[in-house]
Image (cartoon, rainbow, N blue to C red):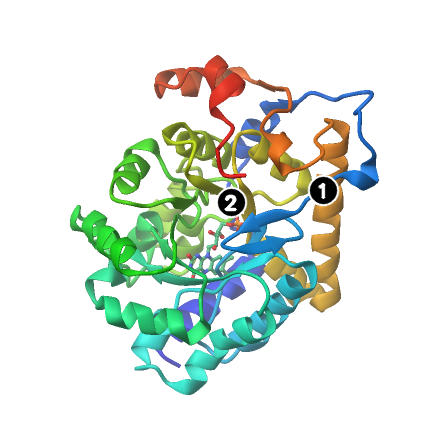
Amino acid sequence: MSNYEHRKQHHIELCLREDVVFPENCKHIFNEIFLVHRAIPGIRLDNVDLSAKFLGYELQAPIIIEAMTGGLPASRPINENLAKIAHKFKISIGVGSQRPILQSSFKQEVIDTYRVVREIAHDVPVIGNIGITQLREVSIDVIKMLIDTINADALAIHLNPAQEAIQPEGDIDFSEDLYYKVRDVVRELNIPVIIKEVGHGLSIEVLSKLVELGVHYVDTAGACGTNWAIVEALRNPKESVNYYVGLELADWGIPTPLSVIEARSISRELVVIASGGVWNGIKALKVLALGANLVGFARPLLKALLEQGLEGAEIYIKRYLTTLRTAMFLVGARDLKSTCKIPIVLGSTIINYLTQRGINPVEYVKRLRCGGYF
Ligand SMILES: Cc1cc2nc3c(=O)[nH]c(=O)nc-3n(C[C@H](O)[C@H](O)[C@H](O)COP(=O)(O)O)c2cc1C
């Protein structure tokens, strides 16, 4: 097994076995977003429409199965099943980092662990994936070849400084030149580029610069779900410094709802995907109400799939969609476009945070949260 294969295998095992999630603080932030119940919703439950447009496709729901795996032999059946789910429910799907394709010099059996996603999920958006620091190592032509291997509809570039800082073999050079690497990729590709974190959130400072350089799609992957500092901590020897540092970063990062607000406050036109602990339909409606266009999740679906099989994973999605639909009914939101107009009340931690970040909370709730995307 190569280093990468070991690492990916280890990540999947740790995500299944250990409690690698953010602690209680995120629960608190989600609880501070109060959706106002409507006793006469003014609509029929069975008329609630979850459909969404994304990357030129009509989806049945505004959902992305977030990037997880590819490369090692064991990832093929995982990707196959995730793709079956994406196809069945007509939702988007991302593949895991495509770096192993580079490392294997485009070996066919490695490519096939990713290509299976496109083959099965042929009628939904499929999103490629590469780490931002890899942009230093590869030419645009090679990136285009990566995209072609899965006929991707968009390329996600992941930003993961906390993960790399704790990872035993991590890449710790996140210098300013990376902004310009992203700019070049955005300019040269003929598909959209999605900038995503992996679980520590995106801020105004980073996003406004990226938006200035041409980025139009962002995925918050905020600090509320899978915690990559903890995952990497557990890959270090127990008494090592990085083991402790990783655990001390247990609640580091921008909680997902706050990252959504930061992103949306930059531009109405930005396509904002909310992920990072958006693990049920109520949380989904909360971030949609804050201005996200789509939601994504990773670990709980993987866990359901590997512990309960395809049927268990499908049950997870069915519950998710039914909860989202029911919650939309209870606030009188007929479709996605209406979710950013439903009455919401924000708690004091969020108000305080927004005020100090230069965002007027009342203006935000009244006007700014609706993107122009739909
Ligand atoms: C097992 C596993 C592997 C992952 N691998 C990748 C990856 O290769 N590239 C990437 O951008 N994100 C990766 N992620 C991060 C997810 O795409 C997502 O951003 C993050 O887990 C937050 O979502 P969650 O809280 O719903 O898990 C991975 C997540 C999991 C659980």
Give 199 or 190, whichever is nearer the viewer: 190
Which residue in the rendered view is the most extreme toward the bottom?
Answer: 108
Give 41 or 198, whichever is nearer the viewer: 41
Disc 2 versus disc 1: nearer the observer: 1
Residue for badge 1: 49
Q: Secondary structure at mark 1?
A: loop
From where the camera sits, is residue 207 visible? yes
- For disc 2, does the CB lie below 8 Å from ligand 1? yes
Q: From the top left corner, tell me how far across and down residue 206 is, in percent.
A: 29, 38
Q: Amino acid at mark 2?
A: Ser
Indicate whether 224 appears above or below 159.
above
Residue for badge 2: 275
Of the residues under marks 2 and 1, which one precedes in the sequence? 1
Q: Amino acid at mark 1?
A: Asp
Left or right of residue 227: residue 170: left
Residue occupying image coordinates x 32% and y 53%: 166
